[in-house]
Image: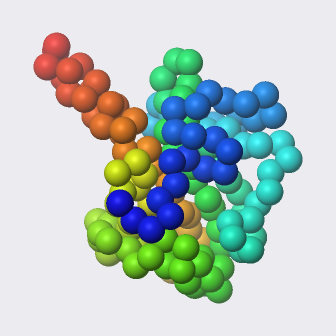
Amino acid sequence: AFQNEPDGFRELKWGDSKTEDMKYFDIIEGHERYVLSKENRHFGNIELEQIFYVFYGDPGRLLSVILSFKGKTTYERLETFCRQEYGEENSEGIGGELYWEGEDTMMGFDYDTEKEEGSVTLLSVSMLTEIMMTEMLEIEKE
């Protein structure tokens, strides 16, 4: 677990269904992404480009939330905010990015220094495990 580990994002919990005020955005790797029509695009007091809500399965259940941002200054402010809010990262991502691993939630940073854009992804641990188990069973059936 990590300090102040969330079990979802804002009022939505992992596994929740879509809300009426969500609009379909696109589909990535078989998961539908939605945006809120009237979104508070702040995380802490930091303004974001967009917040995506990612749903898995049918009916869709909240799997992850992606907070996209632009600019090195925003990245540095988010890094500082996350360390203050969630403590020091307790794991390292594949590319050495910041990574927090908890019992309910994994949270990781992705930042492209050339494009100066990135994202913070919050992800449900239990739903990720469920997806991996389902995919393993599908492979075994083949």
Counting every numbered tag in the picture gives 0
Against 122, is 85 above or below?
Answer: below
- Side of 16 where 57 appears, left or right: left
Q: Is residue 41 left or right of residue 68?
A: right
Image quadrant of residue 1? bottom left
Quadrant in which the C terminus is drawn: top left
Please report the residue visible at 37 percent of the width from the left and 45 percent of the height from the top. 125
Is 128 left, or right, of 83 in this rendering?
left
Residue shown at the point (74%, 65%) measured from the top left: 42
Q: In which image quadrant can residue 43 be found?
A: bottom right
Q: Is residue 56 above or below residue 100?
A: above
Judge left or right: residue 137 versus residue 84: left
Q: How is the image coloured?
A: rainbow
Residue 109 shows in this picture: no
Q: Which residue lies at the image location 20% right of the left edge and 21% below the top edge?
A: 137
Counting from the top left corner in percent of width and height, residue 134 is at: 28, 24
Q: Is residue 133 visible?
A: yes
Residue 6 picture location, percent across and down: 52, 54
In the image, what residue occupies the spot 39% across and 65% down?
A: 2
The relative height of residue 137 versus residue 92 in the rendered view (above or below) is above
Q: Residue furthest top?
A: 141
Q: Position of residue 97 (x, y in %)?
A: 38, 73
